């Protein structure tokens, strides 16, 4: 899980923003989108929490 957290923290900013928007929409594609970036064990809810800790994404 630590490795997957690192993946989420280190993907490009644009990819992180798109991932965050997709996960926020609670679509059924959330699992597929996470798998596309190499995240298989972290839930969508936890992935959103990890993405929220990034300092390069502005939170409104």
Image (cartoon, rainbow, N blue to C red):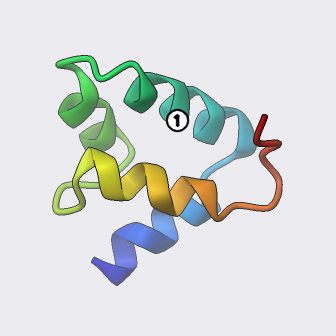
Front residue (pair 23, 9)? 23
Residue at 39 percent of width and 19 percent of height:
25
* Pointer 1 residue: 20
Residue at 24 percent of width and 60 percent of height:
42
Look at the numbered disc 1 and give the secondary structure of its residue.
helix
Is 46 on the left or on the right of 42, as rendered?
Answer: right
Image spot of residue 46 (x, y percent): 34, 58
Is 34 on the left or on the right of 40, as rendered?
Answer: right
In this rendering, the count of numbered labels is 1
How many other residues sit within 10 Å of disc 1, few (<14), some (14-19) or many (≥20)?
Answer: many
Q: In this view, does 13 lie above or below 47?
A: above
Image spot of residue 3 (x, y percent): 37, 77
Q: In this view, does 36 lie above or below 28?
A: below
The answer to whether residue 4 shows anywhere in this view is yes
Q: Is residue 44 above or below residue 24?
A: below
Image spot of residue 35 (x, y percent): 25, 42
Front residue (pair 20, 15)? 20
């Amino acid at each position: 899980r630590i490795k997957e957290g690192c993946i989420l923290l280190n993907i490009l900013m644009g990819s992180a923003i798109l991932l965050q928007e997709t996960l926020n929409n609670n679509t059924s594609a959330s699992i597929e989108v996470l798998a596309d970036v190499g995240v298989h064990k972290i839930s969508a809810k936890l992935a959103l929490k990890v993405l929220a800790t990034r300092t390069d994404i502005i939170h409104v």
